[in-house]
Amino acid sequence: MPSSPGDRFERMRGDGEGLLTGAARRLSRIRIPFRAPSLLDRSAPYFSGIKRFGISKFQHYWQDPFHTLLNLPWGRFIAIFFVTYVMEFMVFAFLFWIQPDHCISNKDGKFAHALWLSSRTASTLGYNEISPNPNCAVTNLTVMLQVIASSLINFIMLGLVFARFSAPFKRASTIRFSSVMVCNRHASGYWCVSLRVANIRKHQILKPSLRMVLTAVDSITPSNYLFEHLAIEGISTQETNLELGFPANVTHVISPASPLYNLSLLEMDTRMMEILVFVDGIDAMTSKNLSARHAYNTNEVHVNESFLPLHLEMRNGALGLDFSSFDSTALASLELLSEHNVDPSLAER
């Protein structure tokens, strides 16, 4: 049998925690000065939040140049893109420039003319007044080398551009997670934590799967993290919602079998606990696997609140969902306010 709601509420909030006067409608918004680091990079959730120390970054990046270029910010990538082609033109322009003038007509010993010849050769635009002499073997060899090198560079750079555009990172960013989690009383009498997930694009996600993982620093060996999978209530229904384009309400019931049972938010903060949520699936347009993930810490858990419902609407003959209240929450139960001798009118604030 579950314990009384008041006892469960105190355990979730931590011993001795009073209501915050500035936000009484939220029965628990525990804030402590220390902000625990996240296992996910919140600015780019597809990156790990775990930094790498004690290794040579330069050597590490150059051992795998493809993924280094693939993960560079667009500004740096475009700069490298232009520098690569300019360097190619300059190197072969130098090789043309040092050759005798009779091997390249109208070069006149000018590097600018050699650079012009190099760019025309690389881009296969053809020659005009400045052209190589077919009777010079070294010049012919230089032209062939540049054509081969230019083709190789084109294949690599265009492949990188295509890979960056087709990478599932951006598609994963169209999976929207609610900005907060809510913690309220479940129909079973236990507490539960919930969040929302939705595919905000019309393109379907095939075979979506949902996972919730609780992470915590090991109290015995602080250099290690512990991971516990949290059971999701009605997971098949919520995965079907995602596949059909509806938001999924991801709920974990804090029953005695749950790793969160009998834990207060203060204890979770002390152990730097996070709840990680993963959404995996296949993009129907590209058939590529995608993975979206989000991390919630205790400051993002709103106790005794629930999400406002999203309403189906008909607009211009089309059925749709209004996402303007996707992150909006409301007080879940006035009962709990009265249990703690709080004026119910505060719920309006």
Image (cartoon, rainbow, N blue to C red):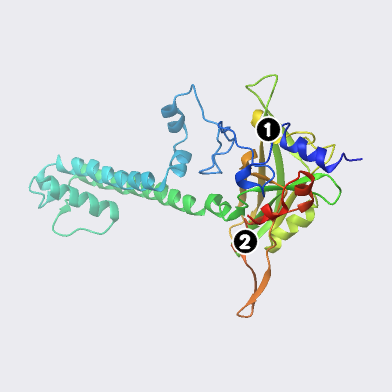
Q: Give the residue type that dot 1 points to.
A: Leu
In the drawing, does residue 139 fall left or right of residue 13? left
**Residue indicated by mark 2:** 325
Residue 95, given in percent of the width and then of the height, sits at 20, 40
Residue in the foreground of this view, choosing between 227 and 14? 14
In the drawing, does residue 41 fall left or right of residue 82? right
Residue in the foreground of this view, choosing between 60 and 49? 49
Answer above or below: position of 23 versus 307: above
Q: Residue furthest left?
A: 108
Q: Residue at x 81, y 49 (%)?
A: 186
Q: Determine whether the residue tagged by mark 2 lies in a helix, strand or loop.
A: helix
Q: Residue furthest right?
A: 1
Residue 17, given in percent of the width and then of the height, sits at 69, 35
Q: Give the residue type that dot 2 points to.
A: Ser
Q: Determine whether the residue tagged by mark 1 lies in a helix, strand or loop.
A: helix
Q: Nearer the viewer, mark 1 or mark 2?
A: 1
Of pointers 1 and 2, the one earlier in the residue sequence = 1
Q: CA distance from mark 1 to mark 2?
A: 29 Å
Q: Which quadrant of the rendered structure holds the N terminus? A: top right
Residue 248 in sight: yes
**Residue indicated by mark 1:** 266
Q: How many marks?
A: 2
Residue in the foreground of this view, choosing between 143 and 260? 260
Mark 1 nearby-residue class (10 Å; few <14, some 14–19, many ≥20): many
